[in-house]
Amino acid sequence: MSATPEGLKYSKEHEWVRVEGNQAVIGITDFAQDELGDIVFVELPGEGAELHANETFGTVESVKTVSDLFAPVTGKVVKVNGALEDNPEHVNSSPYDDGWMVVVEMSNPSELEALLDANGYRAETEA
């Protein structure tokens, strides 16, 4: 059973969002990392990049496959988790803490309303 912490927002594409003021910390869910298997490489945008909700913003490569990352919200990347360059396995071992990917300054916080809460995401992944 995957961990799905309360208090986060979730996309149907398996990204999570932790809202901190006008910023969104984004990563992939425990369910997603479990499905992907051992993560060996993460490609992320640089600081200053503009992300658009529901569009690809990077990739995660595992021993099984390469998977696109989809932005759950629109905004500008203000911070990138550089530790993932040398330690992509953090996405597996700590998807909600050390395995976060980017911090985005949201340009349209109302997009959060389209995301799922923990119960809604659990229902999606158990269906």
Image: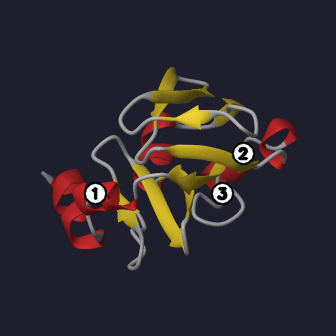
Q: Which residue bears the numbered disc 1?
A: 115
Tell me if 54 is positioned left or right of 28 in this view: left
Q: Identify the disc placed on residue 89.
A: 2
Give the CA separation, mark 2 to mark 1: 26 Å
Give the CA separation, mark 2 to mark 3: 6 Å
Q: Residue at x 61, y 25 (%)?
A: 61
Q: Residue at x 50, y 70 (%)?
A: 19
Front residue of 6 and 46: 46
Q: Identify the disc placed on residue 126.
A: none
Quadrant in which residue 50 is drawn: top right
| SS class, disc 2 | loop
State the image coordinates of residue 96 (x, y, percent, origin top left). Answer: 58, 64
First in residue order: circle 2 vs circle 1? 2
Query: Mark 2 Cα within 10 Å, few/some/many (few <14, many 20+)?
Result: many
Q: Is residue 28 above or below residue 37?
A: below
Q: Which residue bears the numbered disc 3?
A: 93
Give the CA separation, mark 3 to mark 1: 24 Å
Front residue of 22 and 39: 22
Query: Mark 3 Cα within 10 Å, few/some/many (few <14, many 20+)?
Result: some
